[in-house]
Image (cartoon, coloured by chain):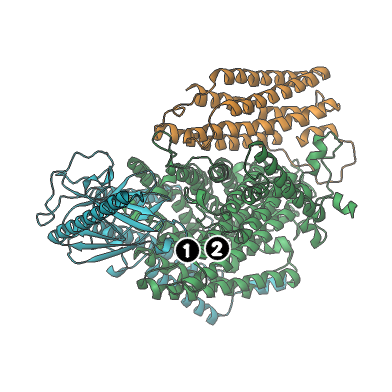
Chain colours: A green, B orange, C cyan
Amino acid sequence: MTAKLRAPGWYRAALFLLLGVAFAYVLVGVVRTLMHEHTPWHDGQAITTVSLIAAPLFFLVGIGCFDYWFAWASGRPTRPEDHSSHGAHSWRDYFRVNTDHKVIGVQYICTSVFFLFVGGLIAMLMRAELAQPGMQFVDSSTFNGLFSVHAALLIFLFVIPVFAGIANYVIPLMIGAPDMAFPRLNALSYWMLPLAGTMMVLSFLAPGGAFATGWTAYAPLSTDMPLGQMFFTVGVQLAGASSIATALNFLVTIITMRAPGMSFFRMPLLVWANFSTSLLVVIATPFIAASQFFVLLDRALGFHFFDTGLGVGKDGYVLMYQHVFWFYSHPAVYIMMLPGFGIISEIISVKSRKPIFGYRMMAFSLLAIVVLGFTVWAHHMFVSGMQGWIRIPMMITTAIIAVPTGIKIFSWLATLWRGVLHLDTPMLFALGFLTTFTLGGISGVMLAMIPFDIHVSDTYFIVAHIHYVLFGGSLFTIFAGIYYWFPKITGRMYDERLGKIHFWCTFVFFNLTFGPMHVLGIEGMPRRVADYAQQYAPLNLAISIVSFLLGLSMLVFLYNMVVSWRGGPHAVANPWRALTLEWQVSSPPPIFNFDAVPTVVGGPYEYGVPGAVHGIFQSPAEARPTAGTIATSPTRE
Amino acid sequence: MEAASASLHAGEAEHHGPPAAHRSSRVDPQMLGMLLFIISEIMVFGAFFTAYFFIRVVQANPWPAAGTELPKLVAGFNTAILLSSSVTLHWALTSVKNGNRWGLRAGMLTTFLLGLTFLFVQINEYVHIGFAPHDSAQASVFYGLTGLHGAHVFIGLVLLLMVTVRAFRGHFSPEAHRGVEIPGIYWHFVDVMWVIVYCSVYLL
Amino acid sequence: MDRIRAALRPETASIRRRLVAALLLTTIGSLVFATGAFADFLTPESGGSSNADQIDSLYKIILYVAIVVFAVVEGALFYSLFKFRAKKNPNAAQIHGNTRLEISWTIGAALILVVLAAVTFAKLSAIQDPPNSSASGLALAQGVLTASADEPSPPNGKKLTICVTGRQYIWRYTYGDGCKTNAFGLPYSYEEMVAPANTTVVLDIQATDVIHSWWIPKLGGKKDAVPGYHNYTWFKAPKVGEVYVGQCAELCGRNHADMTARVRIVSPAAYQAWIDGQRRSIQAADSQVQRLRTQLQSDGDL
């Protein structure tokens, strides 16, 4: 038993979790004694808050994320090339600290899909409550908790990390690297996620209920909430730290570990997309961390960043929270969309058997979105009463950011043009994405126009818009990506028929669920309300019914994934006849990806070009850029 | 950090891993990682400075709040202490590059102790400053910014302690000193950030 | 390999036709529901005040442009879907890009947005700046010079100021120009506001605890109520006897959904009478309290 408790793993993690709580108890007691507080050892709120911070860190130590670094720090000998924690040989290896980017990618994807289903179930509960006016199933504070947890989970525990997961799996393969630049940091970034998610779900058990301030957690409401709010505040810090660490890892990997010949303009667009996303994450995410630090300090330690009751010359500034929050959270919508753009570019080009249209413009428009993404944050605050003059420049930049996005849409359409379209499941999701995302983009441009925004902000129009962008946009690309790389990741083929059923159900029910919400918003139904006026009742009932069907169609996906992974037909190395490097190795790839580092001799999307080659598995000296007859060259048209 | 031992132990055991990754950039991965991390850190400070800006400039609150005073002089001495620790750190790095083991150890130890002194002076300042974070928004910003910086000093000290321990255990050499260099960059960043905090919070 | 080929083989034609029909239906459904509607009945609530009407007409302009853009995108998509599927079109064209085309759609997209922004900009002042009260409106004294630059004011400066204070979970209205500085003794009401028709009413919106948002859809101008700030909006309602309803639009806590508001538009004379009545009952209550206080003091209970 002691051996088990000493070795990194779940036993030690559980022990350390308890130690973390004990540590928090003692720390709070000692500090409060020093501060001469009344009843220093019996403040449940303070102990819980400190436990929320300490226990996850202790858990991470216990599970073994820091073992190597501790050994290094204490001066004990370490072997950086120690691969003992690398790769998966049985399912158990997915439940320990693993440094293999492929294992971490699968861990990421499975964890975030788990939270997708949790968040989706919560949405079903909300729709049940909203089916009729009045209160039926939950009370109003539980309802506020439901939509807050729903949004927080799906944003911080699903969309952002699932893209990180797909990229984790695919990017090192795509650029011809054996792993990520910092494999141990990669493992640490993953293990912070389930902790953040668990914390947010557990907030339902907190006295006073789950955090109920929306995912925006506007101060001063959030600084004045029951304990559940702290589960969000700290959970977001963990998810954010995970996000930053992964992004940093991607940037370093992409910059320093590309295969010979892989110049920036020979990188697949998925790599470009994740490069841009990671830049956004590294620069923007600290702002949400800070905004939650402010809330933490205000609520737990009595700071007054946002308090206005202190008297003239001492007051805090309420709108500061929104400025800081949106300075992250607007770029965050691009963090949640750009990797999807990358996935769509891959799939549309492969499934049209045609080079991507305007490769360079595709890459530059990503970078343009990164830059412009930082200049539009205050369009979320048109009705907040901030200085009026800020609204005009924000409206203009918001309109401008639609241009690079429009360029991408047009380029995808031009890629389809005169191609050879194979309409299988990934392609269907990609084309469905083109439709729904165009709608989301158009309603986004409408929202940029100040007067219209004044009318519909904080209404169901916003709910519709964000779901057209994040569900019709991000989630469709995620499904497309999961289907597309499923054979590579699992070595099995998914069931095409079930995949198509999943697509058509999702596409139809999605539009029928969220399309009518535009109308609700325009007619004046505010969002985040547990109860609403009688005039909105018929449409809400219809939406609720369809949304249950939408929920059910997700089960088709789950069934397909589980059954195909267990018993689907074996996949060949390159079922899609793609050129990018990840398809040139076996499915699933060998433990160290490549036996020899490949050499890149051409662009990634030369489909249909006779003799075109992207990468070859030979030494650079032997490689010939026009090698049409080399036997080892990848499959061609 | 890993890299230091990477080169230290290179060839120590037979290598069973993947083919070494191709280096597509002259920049060192560890160095690049640290620089990107520092960009993130700058943005955290940026957010706290946003709070400072809104409360001091936009809200036009008097700075510091009426009836309070900031110990410019003591903090100025403290600034000097922290800046001198950057010098000693540089000395330690130069020493290890020249193979001067004694210089490395002495430099690291001095740097660590100077940093520790800074932290103690800062805590002492909190105890005697005469206002608490809940007294006013300005006090919140003051404690927020200096506290955030103090936390970074603490993290930096932990890193320095690791390097010092390893220096005393005989690690690092003229060929392999990234383990000194990269935590060192972080420490320099913490110092530069303090100068900005000191100027904007205490002096301006 | 064969099995994969089988999996990739196109479905039978009938299934396909049905799927395409479903796709078309959904797209039409999306068009009707998602981008709003072609008819008037799915456009923003309006008719209560001229700023709401302006928002409505701006929305229609943007919507028409949006429908055109969407139709172009979907048209290209469907044409490609039917024309270039693998069965019909075995050879892909080798197009890597077309600089002229790329530049032209970049400029085209930018132009559309410039036009939209320009239209919006042109409409903005009519939405932000209140007009003068009509002659049939409440007779108002020349207003004092506006203290705050943010506070909207009609060209002749004559306006009725009503302070709207949000707190968990009810709206309070204080009537009269002095409400911003000292609300004591002024007529007030909760939840239902009474306002004169044809009169420019400027709302001074505040909050005491957390952020709320004032919104009566048909009266235009949503505005957050932020603790420590004065935000402003206005309306000028022409129809006597109408009651406009709204709900707090910024999540403000547990009973956010129950924080409703009503605005009852009455004739200026009825408004004056109502205000006088409110004032009298406040005075009556005040003197009652005064009497009680003297009573208690003389009894030695206070």
Task: Single out the residue that lies furthest toward the bottom.
Answer: C14
Query: From this viewpoint, is residue C220 visible?
Result: yes
Q: From what the image shows, is residue A513 above or below residue C301?
A: below
Q: Which mark is residue A476?
A: 2
User: In the displayed structure, does residue A117 sit left or right of residue C133?
Assistant: right
Residue, disc 1: A436
Q: Which mark is residue A48?
A: none
Residue count near mark 2 (Cα–Cα under 10 Å), binned few <14, some 14–19, many ≥20: many
Residue A626 place in picture, x, y as percent = 66, 48
Query: From this viewpoint, is residue A365 visible?
Result: no
Q: Nearer the viewer, residue A365 or A13?
A: A13
Q: What separation in Å lies between label 1 and label 2 (alpha carbons)?
A: 9 Å
Residue count near mark 1 (Cα–Cα under 10 Å), binned few <14, some 14–19, many ≥20: many
Looking at the image, tell me whether mark 1 or mark 2 is earlier in sequence order. Answer: 1
Given the image, on which type of amino acid does mark 2 rest? Phe
User: In the displayed structure, does residue C205 sit left or right of residue A346?
Assistant: left
Q: From what the image shows, is residue B70 above or below residue A428?
A: above
* Residue occupying the point 67% across, 21% down: B86
Given the image, on which type of amino acid does mark 1 rest? Thr
Rendered image quadrant of residue C47 = bottom left
Residue C157 place in picture, x, y as percent = 16, 44
User: In the displayed structure, does residue A10 sit left or right of residue B50?
Assistant: right
In the structure shown, which secondary structural element does the residue marked by tag 1 occupy? helix
**Do the numbered discs 1 and 2 sit on residues whose CB atoms are within 8 Å?**
yes
In the structure shown, which secondary structural element does the residue marked by tag 2 occupy? helix
Residue A272 place in picture, x, y as percent = 58, 47
Q: Nearer the viewer, residue B57 or C171?
A: C171
* Residue occupying the point 86% across, 26% down: B170
Q: Nearer the viewer, residue C67 or A413?
A: C67
Chain to which the residue tagged by mark 2 belongs: A
